[in-house]
Image: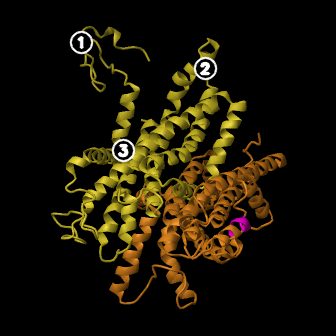
Chain colours: A yellow, B orange
């Protein structure tokens, strides 16, 4: 694209959509939009993704501020108010020990949200690193890495997490690590597939021909072209991690009580599900809302980052 | 082609071998299988020593592994520490409920998801298609076990008390016996296990169908005057079914994972419930056998998907 800013003189840069006044010096000229502006414009069109992103932001803020905003202590037993249905004092009711369910859901959310983010980030970094290296070098490196990745991908997630849970007595940190170990191969396989497409493009060949180092080619020329699929897959991994944690904790092999997590709150809720319906609905709805927002966000990013999308 | 299949087969064997090592070591790490007996004051020390020798627990781990794999290759999964019967007989008793649940869920899923996916592609952005998109997002985002709990509450408890008669049972597999009774028990676990798969497969079928619908040969078929019906069902569907069949085969592992949770929530007496239970009780040989079965299930269906694809799609390369 021709740089149109050169002949704009001392005037301030126009907004992306501004067309210079008719008859003026810059008649009919529009400043080209940067990549970032194009992506943001496309993303904004996906309303559910915007809403999902906003809700997620709120949830993360609430998780950060939990010790300040939580109305009660999550372990505080109050025999004067056990098994109360939702009220103004206890918006999500109380459990059989009189503990405030909203407080417990907030504390459980800290674990789920932090774990989702950590698993998403670390699986992405590890998976993308191996994926790019395997795709770029092919031959022996590729065969070895992808052989291992294919092996990992045939392992059943839930049974393996259960076994690991029965060995390690999961804490928030160890269950996060276990999930990173199980989930990074997904990212590696996907990224490698994208790299294979990019690797043979002319600009990569050209960079090689002029003697750019391999590391620089991978970071400067290949990584930016696979970032789109990486981000979308990362959101899928975040949602999966949150769902897996709740499932493993629900089965009693994940986060252990008295530390609340959305999964083990639901284990508690089962013992008297019919009378104390609120204990089943609220933690479960939080899981669904969080995973749904993450998935909407991913869908919006998929549309926004798709290079083949038409304006 | 033949070489391709042989290579895939060999890879599958290697994967299963590696999986067996991983499972054996992990399960062995999870504690002492005779701990319950050792803590029981009524059990004699001599009995514990006898059992330790009988189960081969005094041998070093590699030897134990060798014996276990050797027996397994002869079709013997060993003895359950908990029930002191053979693992084979326990699995034989528990396998049919799982086959029934997973099989009926698969049939139900395919019967709902594929027609709906095709409809969504043909009537893209119609009200029903948009509803389907939203539903599938919710389906992806819902923990299987929580859906089970909610169905127990709403369709099991509230509906029954509203109707005055029991319509769906919320746990177990058989009551009074008979087909109607079985269906009353099966309905809720079946829905629980199927929702995520329906969400996934219907969206997949939709996008596969959309890919095919925009291809040149379909425009040609329409241009030469064939009816929509013939074009959609004969030309498009054939090509759009293959990717979905592959995805269904590849998601068997996830479906088994879902079955573990579904069976636990509904006390369905199958293999998934047994696996969760055996890990709790430290019943090692049962846990190992079930882990191997789930890995074998995944590897088998991966293989089927690969081979089916290579047989049907001439564009697959065998390098």
State the CA–CA distance, disc 3 to disc 2: 37 Å
Dominant secondary structure of the magenta stretch? Answer: helix
In the rendered image, the vertical position of residue A145 relative to residue B36, given as above or below: above
Which of these two is toward me, A142 or A206? Answer: A142
Chain letter of the residue carrying label 3? A
Query: Which image quarter: residue B64?
Result: bottom right
**Is the residue at mark 2 from the same chain as the one at mark 1?**
yes
Chain letter of the residue carrying label 2? A
**Is the residue at mark 3 from the same chain as the one at mark 1?**
yes
Q: Position of residue B210 (x, y in %)?
A: 54, 51
Q: Position of residue A8 (x, y in %)?
A: 29, 11
Is residue B52 one of those drawn in magenta? yes
State the CA–CA distance, disc 3 to disc 1: 34 Å
The magenta span reads B51-55
Which of these two is toward me, A225 or A218? Answer: A218
State whether residue B225 appears in this view: no
**Is the residue at mark 3 from the same chain as the one at mark 2?**
yes
In the rendered image, the vertical position of residue B284 relative to residue A19, given as above or below: below
Would you name the residue on which mark 3 appears?
Answer: A46
B154 to the left or right of B276: left
Tell me which residue sits at (25%, 14%) in the image.
A24
B204 to the left or right of A56: right
State the CA–CA distance, disc 2 to disc 1: 42 Å
Mark 3 or mark 1, which has the lower sequence index?
1
Is residue A259 one of those drawn in magenta? no
């Amino acid at each position: 694209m021709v740089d149109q800013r050169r002949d704009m003189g001392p005037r301030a840069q126009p907004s992306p959509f501004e067309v210079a006044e008719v008859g003026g010096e810059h008649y009919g000229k529009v400043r080209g939009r940067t990549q970032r502006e194009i992506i943001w414009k496309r993303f904004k069109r996906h309303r559910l993704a915007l809403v999902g992103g906003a809700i997620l932001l709120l949830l993360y803020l609430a998780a950060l501020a939990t010790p300040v905003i939580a109305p009660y202590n999550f372990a505080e037993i109050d025999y004067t108010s056990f098994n109360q249905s939702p009220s103004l004092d206890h918006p999500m009711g109380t459990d059989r020990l009189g503990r405030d369910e909203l407080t417990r859901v907030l504390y459980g959310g800290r674990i789920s949200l932090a774990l989702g983010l950590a698993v998403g980030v670390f699986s992405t970094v590890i998976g993308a690193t191996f994926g790019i290296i395997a795709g770029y070098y092919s031959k022996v490196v590729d065969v070895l890495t992808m052989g291992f990745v294919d092996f990992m991908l045939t392992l059943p997630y839930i049974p393996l997490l259960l076994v690991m849970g029965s060995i390690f007595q999961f804490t928030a940190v160890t269950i996060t690590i276990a999930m990173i170990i199980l989930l990074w191969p997904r990212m590696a396989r996907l990224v490698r597939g994208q790299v294979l497409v990019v690797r043979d493009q002319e600009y990569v060949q050209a960079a090689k021909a002029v003697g750019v180092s391999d590391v620089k080619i991978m970071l400067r020329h290949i990584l930016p072209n696979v970032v789109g699929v990486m981000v979308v897959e990362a959101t899928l991994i975040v949602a999966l991690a949150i769902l897996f944690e709740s499932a493993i904790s629900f089965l009693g092999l994940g986060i252990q009580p008295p530390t609340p997590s959305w999964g083990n709150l639901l284990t508690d809720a089962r013992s008297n599900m019919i009378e104390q319906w609120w204990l089943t609905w609220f933690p479960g709805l939080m899981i669904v809302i969080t995973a749904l927002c993450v998935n909407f966000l991913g869908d919006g990013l998929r549309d926004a980052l798709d290079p083949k999308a038409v304006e | 082609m033949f070489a391709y299949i042989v290579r895939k087969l060999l890879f599958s064997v290697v994967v299963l071998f590696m999986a067996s090592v991983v499972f054996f070591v992990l399960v062995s790490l999870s504690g002492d299988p005779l701990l319950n007996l050792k803590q029981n004051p009524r059990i004699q020390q001599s009995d514990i020593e006898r059992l330790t020798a009988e189960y081969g627990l005094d041998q070093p781990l590699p030897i134990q592994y060798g014996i276990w794999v050797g027996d397994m290759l002869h079709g013997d999964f060993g003895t359950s520490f908990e029930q002191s019967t053979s693992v084979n007989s326990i699995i034989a008793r528990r396998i049919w409920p799982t086959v029934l649940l997973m099989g009926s869920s698969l049939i139900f899923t395919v019967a709902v998801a594929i027609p709906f996916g095709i409809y969504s592609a043909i009537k893209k952005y119609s009200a029903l298609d948009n509803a389907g998109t939203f539903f599938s997002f919710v389906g992806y985002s819902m923990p299987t076990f929580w859906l089970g709990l909610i169905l127990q509450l709403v369709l099991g408890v509230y509906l029954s008390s509203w109707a005055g008669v029991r319509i769906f049972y919320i746990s177990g597999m058989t009551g009074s016996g008979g087909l109607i009774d079985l269906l009353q028990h099966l309905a809720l676990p079946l829905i629980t296990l199927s929702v995520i798969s329906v969400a996934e497969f219907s969206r997949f079928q939709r996008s596969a169908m959309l890919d095919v619908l925009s291809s040149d040969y379909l425009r040609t078929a329409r241009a030469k005057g064939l009816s929509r019906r013939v074009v959609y069902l004969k030309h498009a569907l054939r090509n759009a079914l293959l990717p979905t069949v592959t995805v269904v085969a590849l998601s068997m592992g996830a479906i088994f994972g879902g079955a573990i949770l579904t069976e636990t929530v509904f006390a369905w007496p199958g293999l998934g419930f047994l696996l969760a239970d055996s890990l709790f009780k430290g019943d090692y040989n049962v846990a190992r056998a079930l882990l191997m079965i789930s890995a074998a299930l995944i590897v088998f269906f991966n293989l089927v998907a690969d081979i089916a694809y290579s047989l049907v799609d001439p564009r697959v390369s065998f390098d």
